[in-house]
């Protein structure tokens, strides 16, 4: 299953897996859509740091538990952070909150199988803050 948390809609991934019911594509973006295993959660500007983590704890976990995928593939982008090009007004801490929840779900439902790739984002200071902390969470459950 694929989780996309950068600011923009994951249209390429959706095109590839759009017809495949066995692949959950869960995307935070500017759209609102619920097609079972294809979900878009619209992120209003200023939604707050808890918004992503709360949706991951709620709807995302619900869909992962229903599908029980082999692994979670997380397209991690930080461009939604305030001051970056896709800003939705969240702070760098929002990514840490979501990483804890994604790790928990991967451990509990997917036997710890979690792959993260770096996607959108341009600010080095945000990368320098978030990436080492996310790696620490992956290593220690932090
Ligand atoms: Zn989307």
Image (spheres, rainbow, N blue to C red):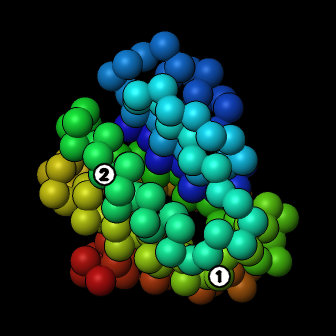
Residue at 50 percent across and 75 percent down: it is 50
The Cα atoms of the two marked residues, 2 and 1, are separated by 23 Å
Residue 83 appears left or right of 93: right
**Could you say whether the residue bearing mark 2 is in a helix, strand or loop?**
helix
**Residue behind mark 1:** 91
**Could you say whether the residue bearing mark 1 is in a helix, strand or loop?**
loop
Callout 1: few (<14), some (14-19), or many (20+) C-alpha neighbours within 10 Å? some
Quadrant hosting residue 79 = bottom right
Q: What residue occupies the far top of the structure in this picture? A: 19
Callout 2: few (<14), some (14-19), or many (20+) C-alpha neighbours within 10 Å? many
Instruction: Say if mark 2 contacts mark 1, CB within 8 Å.
Output: no
- Point out residue 140 in the picture as x, y percentages from the top left corner: 25, 81
For ligand 1, tell me if the residue under mark 2 lies within 8 Å: no
Label whose residue precedes the other's in the sequence (2 or 1): 2
Residue at 41 percent across and 46 percent down: it is 73
Query: Which quadrant is the N terminus positioned in?
Result: top left
**Residue behind mark 2:** 61
- Point out residue 142 in the picture as x, y percentages from the top left corner: 29, 83
Residue at 23 percent across and 36 percent down: it is 66
Badge number at residue 30: none
Q: Is residue 97 above or below residue 110?
A: below
Residue 69 appears left or right of 39: left
Quadrant hosting residue 108 = bottom left
- Point out residue 128 in the picture as x, y percentages from the top left corner: 62, 83
Q: Is residue 83 above or below residue 69?
A: below
Residue 7 visible in the picture = yes
Residue at 62 percent across and 40 percent down: it is 32
Residue 16 appears left or right of 137: right
Quadrant hosting residue 44 = bottom right
- Along the line of sight, which residue is nearer the eye, 115 or 22? 22
- Along the line of sight, which residue is nearer the eye, 91 or 35? 35
């Amino acid at each position: 299953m694929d989780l996309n948390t950068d600011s923009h809609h994951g249209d390429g991934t959706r095109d590839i897996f759009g017809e495949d019911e066995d692949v959950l594509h869960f995307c935070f973006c500017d759209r609102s859509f619920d097609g079972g295993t294809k979900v878009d959660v619209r992120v209003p500007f200023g939604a707050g740091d808890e918004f992503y983590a709360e949706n991951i704890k709620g709807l995302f976990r619900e869909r992962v538990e229903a599908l029980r995928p082999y692994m979670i593939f997380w397209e991690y982008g930080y461009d939604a952070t305030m001051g970056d090009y896709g800003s939705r007004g969240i702070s760098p801490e929002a990514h840490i909150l979501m990483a804890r929840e994604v790790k928990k779900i991967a451990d509990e439902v997917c036997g710890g199988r979690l792959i993260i790739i770096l996607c959108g984002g341009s600010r080095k200071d945000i990368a320098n803050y978030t990436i080492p902390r996310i790696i620490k969470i992956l290593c220690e459950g932090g």
